[in-house]
Amino acid sequence: MKKLVVILCLFLIVSFTACSVKEDDSVCVKDSCDMPPIPAFCLNATLPENTVMAAMTEDGQRVFYVHDDFTICKESVSASSADEAFQMLTGRTQESLRPVTVTRFPQEEYRYSCTVAGEYGEEVCTGVLFFDGTHGYSLQITCDARAEKAYRGVFAELLENTTLDAV
């Protein structure tokens, strides 16, 4: 009889543990990876002599060049409008910069200039922005306000010869 009770208890223990109510602790997560569109163009510029590449981001979308008296930054950003591109690249709106629009093939080109507070005084920032509908491509030159006059012709030539080429 003892054997029968032990076998019955063992059977009940095994069968009731399998019948326990289990809560569903799993969470279904639907991940989506929205990749920004790949730039369709590449910004090209013939840089002045004695200009050296100083830094570049991992993705190559921002490159800094230095000269003894000025800094050049080539950058491309994903943007839905030209105003958003201006905001991302300069921190200012298109309206506050009041850029000159030069229509050239393949994209619209904006030229702008502004002054900014620099480490050692006032600096002048001169740039060009191309916008293709999904990306803004910019070349910005920053220099000390006192040295800007001496390089004005160099900067104008650099901006004039900056092109947007298909990748």
Image (cartoon, rainbow, N blue to C red):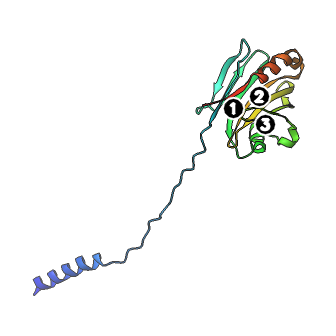
Q: Which mark is residue 140?
A: 2
The disc, 1 or 3, on the residue closer to the chain's N-terminal end is 1
Q: Is residue 73 left or right of residue 111?
A: left
**Where does the image place residue 124, in percent across and percent down from the top left?**
85, 26
Rounded to the nearest angstrom, the CA distance separating label 2 from label 3 is: 9 Å
Which element is circle 1 on? strand
Rounded to the nearest angstrom, the CA distance separating label 1 from label 3 is: 11 Å
Q: Amino acid at mark 3?
A: Thr
Please report contact status of discs 1 and 2: CB closer than 8 Å, yes or no: yes
Rounded to the nearest angstrom, the CA distance separating label 1 from label 2 is: 8 Å
Q: Which residue is mark 3?
A: 90
Q: Amino acid at mark 1?
A: Glu
> Which residue is at the far bottom?
1
Please report contact status of discs 2 and 3: CB closer than 8 Å, yes or no: yes
Q: Is residue 159 left or right of residue 21?
A: right
Q: Residue at x 22, y 81 (%)?
A: 12
Q: Residue at x 71, y 33 (%)?
A: 106
Determine the image quadrant of residue 138.
Answer: top right
**Where does the image place residue 155, in percent across and percent down from the top left?**
81, 20
Q: Which residue is mark 1?
A: 75
Q: Amino acid at mark 2?
A: Gln
Which element is circle 2 on? strand
* Rendered-image quadrant of the N terminus: bottom left
